[in-house]
Image: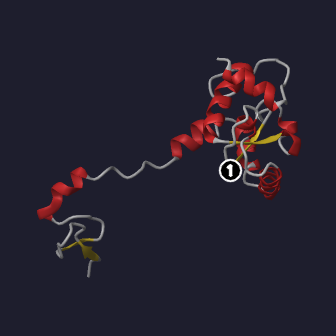
Amino acid sequence: MPRVKRCRANGCHAMVAFDSRYCKRHQDLAMDEPKPKRNNYHYNHHVRNRDENKINQYKFYRTKNWVQLRQLALESQHYLCQYCLANDIVTTAKTADHIVPVEFDSNLKDNIDNLAVICPSCHTKKTKWEQRWYGTGQGNTLRSVRPINDVKTINKMMNDV
């Protein structure tokens, strides 16, 4: 006997094949439903894992060492965005960010002094600044510039644009 289930339309009790969602009477509802998310194959294989360096960076963020470092940074900085604090604004945050990007200097990836708590809006600004200053990000070429590891200096530079 083939597997069946109920139609997904409200109040309809018609049975449909297991791989279908709606009965013939409610087939038009399937057109209004958003398409299921495409799998992440393209993103993972062509963007995130585009080369050996990016694969190793991504693996690092799945290690116990990173989880402990991140938690230590969050707790020591009291879950407050350090970039907002540089402007005397108190904002809570849950992201630990590398001050000098790992893509630029991978030796600093597990250095607690290279971590700062950052809120989403500052993180967006800082990422754009890193792309201009260091040349990080897809399609960019790393530049030979001096690394800046002072949050106040970075904050001033990323807000001056």
Asked whether 79 or 137 is in front, the reply is 79
Residue that appears at 23% across and 51% down: 32
Residue that appears at 83% across and 36% down: 106
Picture coordinates of residue 59, whole percent (x, y) = 73, 49
The answer to whether residue 19 is left or right of residue 160 is: left
Question: Up-down: is 143 above or below 106?
Answer: above
Q: Which residue is mark 1?
A: 94
The answer to whether residue 24 is left or right of residue 5 is: left
Image quarter for residue 21? Answer: bottom left
Report whether residue 135 is seen. Answer: no
Asked whether 77 or 17 is in front, the reply is 77
> Quadrant where the N terminus lies?
bottom left
> Quadrant where the C terminus lies?
top right
Asked whether 137 or 16 is in front, the reply is 137
Picture coordinates of residue 42, whole percent (x, y) = 52, 41
Report whether residue 151 is seen. Answer: yes
